[in-house]
Image (cartoon, rainbow, N blue to C red):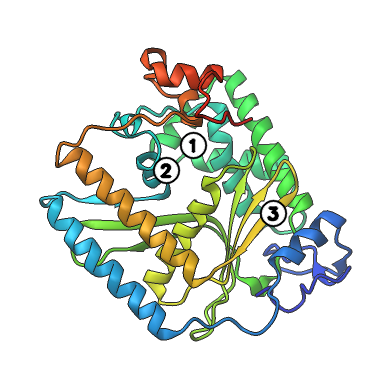
Amino acid sequence: MMPKGCDGEAGSCRASSVGRVQEPAPVALTPSQERTLGLLRRSGEPLVFPAEFVDHLHATATEALAELSERLGGETLWVSKSFLARVHGCEVLHLQPDEFEWRPSTAAGFVAHKAIELALNWRGEAVPAVVVDDAIARLADQANARGAFLDSLSEGDRAELRSRAIDRTTKFLQDFPPLPLAAQPVLEATAKWRPAGTIELSGKVDLQVGRPAGRESQLLLIDFKSGGRSFHHRDDLRFYALVQTLRQSVPPRKLATYYLDYAEAEAEDVTEGALQAALTRTLEGIDRHIELTMEGREPVKKPGPSCRWCPLAAECTEGQLYLRGDDPEVQVDD
């Protein structure tokens, strides 16, 4: 639930509840902040899932993953939201090597996330341009692919990346409700679960809010998106909720996708049905992957939004029809 001191009334949230060392006097919330806070706030009685349900979910997942691990023949498989999105999408694309390359437009997300993380713990007022510059400098020093990309940027690409990241960071700081220190906000919170076997489930949510309280569900999981809405955003969050439940044996209470460009959130209460659906989708995705990679099943083409960046699109009749909007069986997303 939203912690004390952030009850949605004007002036009730502290402006520096985003984790500053000292919290100044309360300020009034904007209408968009009030609207978002209303969606995220806990309503009704405390939520406690039956222990029998959680135990059954855990046992079902453990048994199913053990059987799937045997079919992998000893190979390790890391299952993430992107893995599931690919295997439930076009199976031909799923089998292609991952040739992803960072660009200023795609790197703006992780730079903005780092900048927001810094802003949550900044002494005094966090100026978006300042925290973004600091974020770029820190990330460029890291010995990984992202650091190498940032370190090699041309001045033009750096300026483009900086502009995009400042835009996202500004929208978060201006439009998202401030969070009190007691909310224990965590950026890019990672949860992993690996029972006996060779399959590991791993999720990383943009923002986790709340703290454990026995068996009561208190965690709020939020993903930030800079583009438009997509059907798989809810699936992503349900997968995070599943991993968190298997890891901690306490489900989160609510999931939300926050669209920075619109200053709007879509929220969903966590239910037994949502967790069961997430487990079914996860197991079906792993099963499909094993059929394709270990058991020789032919992949099925499934045109969709991924056709726009698929390396096989130029040679794929179905993909070309989708991109032209000529396939009556396919609905083109705006």
Q: Secondary structure at mark 3?
A: strand
Label pair 2/1, CB-CB below 8 angstroms: no
Q: Is residue 38 left or right of residue 115?
A: right
Q: Nearer the viewer, mark 2 or mark 1?
A: 2
Q: Quadrant of the C terminus?
A: top right
The furthest residue to the front:
328
Label 2 vs 1, first from the N-terminus: 2
Which one is in front, 5 or 294? 294
Which residue is disc 1 drawn over?
A: 140
Label pair 1/3, CB-CB below 8 angstroms: no
Residue displayed at 38% across by 47% down: 84
Spatial CA distance of label 2 from label 1 is: 29 Å
Which residue is disc 3 drawn over?
A: 265
Q: Quadrant of residue 59?
A: bottom left
Label 1 vs 3, first from the N-terminus: 1
Q: Is residue 282 left or right of residue 155?
A: left
Q: Residue 153 bears which disc, if any? A: none
Q: Secondary structure at mark 1?
A: helix
In the rendering, at what x and y percent does residue 240 appear? Answer: 46, 59
Residue displayed at 86% across by 70% down: 25
Which residue is disc 2 drawn over?
A: 85
Give the residue type at disc 2.
Answer: Ala
Give the residue type at disc 1.
Answer: Ala
Q: Residues within 10 Å of mark 2 (few under 14, many from 20)?
A: some
